[in-house]
């Protein structure tokens, strides 16, 4: 099992060796992995590769005060799996650029141990091995992952395939992770239902396996995973597809307990659900004649809500009781002042 990691005694190369040992064999898909100058993937005939990168940076995406190392390691891979899933891809492996603060005592064995343990457990469950990376000293912690997956040739799901008449479906529920973040930042005691929101923020469970199934069943025309908030992510999708969308407010699957918990924190439940990031659910479009959301949910084994339709035009419109209603479109943007 996990050897204890003493960074100062190990040094860079000792650490890499410890990572290599813990990552284990990369499996048959890889001809070379950790230990060479590059990893070599045996690409499968008739398939195309999908690459994605997502970083978690201390002070930007997480604080040690509000997360634990094991969850952080799992989340770092989970958010990349979410992107692969949103492209309809099956994961094949990932690279890890691990940035660690260099001052003595800044990195504890427990942190490194937990982080690698969580990440490699997630990797094993997803059959997505760690195949290489880089290890560097930096002003703060960051986990920069690059994941690779594959799809049958020409069949990747993109944001650009939505057509007027398509129906809009979303998995799971929205708003919980954003509320969790606010609770953690406010230092609230996380009893009962509130703990569930916090856990969603700390350790998202994206339904990434759904993407490849949608591709296999030729069910979806476009997809995006929800990382920046449904309103903004849908805006991205309709812009890339050069269409508009109409969303029925009543149909939005707000996280259970969100309406009850938001007012206490001075938050509006609907705004939290629409603009709050890190839900890591899948938003996708199906053609008009596709089976109902209920039938699809049963067949695919996920919770699905049909929230609206794609139409001609541009932009996202929100309807309440069938009538247009003004909703500010916000969401998470690293370089713009916060919208919520
Ligand atoms: P180079 O100097 O050629 O860039 P490194 O000395 O940085 O190589 O890394 C040696 C080997 O260890 C490479 O195969 C690299 O992919 C792997 N590696 C380095 N850091 C990590 C890491 N954090 N996770 C997984 N593999 C790593
Ligand atoms: Mg080299």
Image: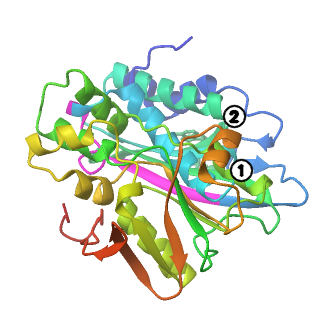
The magenta segment is 51-65
Residue 212 image label: 1
Q: Position of residue 91 (x, y in %)?
A: 68, 46
Packing grade of label 2 (10 A; few <14, some 14-19, many >=20) is: some
Q: Which residue is mark 2?
A: 127
Tell me which residue sits at (77%, 42%) in the image.
Answer: 32
Query: What is the secondary structure assignment of the residue under circle 1?
Result: helix
Q: Is residue 55 magenta?
A: yes
Number of callouts? 2
**Image quarter for ligand 1:** top right
Give the side of residue 276 with respect to residue 119, left or right. left
Q: Position of residue 256 (x, y in %)?
A: 33, 37
Residue furthest top as drawn: 1
Which residue is more in the foreground, 113 or 105? 113
Say whether disc 2 or disc 1 marks the residue closer to the N-terminus.
2
Packing grade of label 1 (10 A; few <14, some 14-19, many >=20) is: many
Give the side of residue 252 with respect to residue 239, left or right. left
């Amino acid at each position: 099992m996990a050897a204890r990691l003493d960074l100062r005694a190990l040094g860079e190369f000792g650490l890499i060796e410890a990572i290599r040992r813990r990552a284990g064999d990369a499996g048959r898909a890889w001809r070379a992995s950790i230990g060479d100058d590059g990893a070599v993937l045996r690409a499968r005939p008739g398939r195309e590769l999908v690459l994605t990168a997502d970083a978690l940076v201390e002070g930007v995406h997480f604080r040690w005060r509000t997360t634990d190392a094991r969850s952080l390691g799992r989340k770092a891979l989970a958010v990349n799996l979410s992107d692969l899933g949103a492209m309809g891809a099956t994961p094949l492996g990932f690279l890890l650029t691990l940035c660690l603060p260099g001052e003595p005592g800044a990195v504890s064995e427990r942190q490194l141990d937990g982080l690698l343990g969580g990440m490699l457990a997630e990797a094993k469950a997803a059959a997505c091995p760690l195949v290489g990376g880089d290890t560097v000293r930096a002003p703060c912690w960051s986990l920069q992952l690059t994941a690779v997956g594959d799809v049958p040739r020409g069949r990747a799901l993109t944001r650009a395939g939505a057509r007027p008449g398509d129906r809009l479906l979303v998995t799971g529920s929205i708003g919980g992770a954003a509320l969790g973040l606010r609770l953690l930042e406010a230092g609230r005691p996380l009893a009962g239902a509130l703990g569930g929101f916090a856990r969603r923020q700390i350790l998202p469970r994206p339904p990434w396996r759904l993407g490849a199934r949608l591709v296999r069943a030729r069910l979806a025309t476009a997809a995006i995973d929800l990382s920046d908030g449904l309103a903004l992510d849908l805006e991205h999708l309709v812009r890339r597809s050069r269409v508009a969308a109409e969303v029925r407010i009543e149909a939005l699957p707000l996280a259970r307990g969100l309406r009850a918990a938001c007012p206490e924190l001075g938050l509006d439940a609907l705004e939290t659900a629409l603009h709050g990031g890190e839900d890591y659910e899948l938003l996708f479009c199906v053609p008009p004649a596709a089976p109902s959301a209920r039938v699809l949910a049963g067949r695919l084994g996920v919770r699905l809500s049909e929230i609206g339709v794609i139409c001609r035009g541009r932009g996202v419109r929100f309807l309440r009781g069938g009538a247009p209603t003004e909703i500010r479109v916000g969401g998470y943007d690293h370089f713009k002042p916060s919208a919520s």
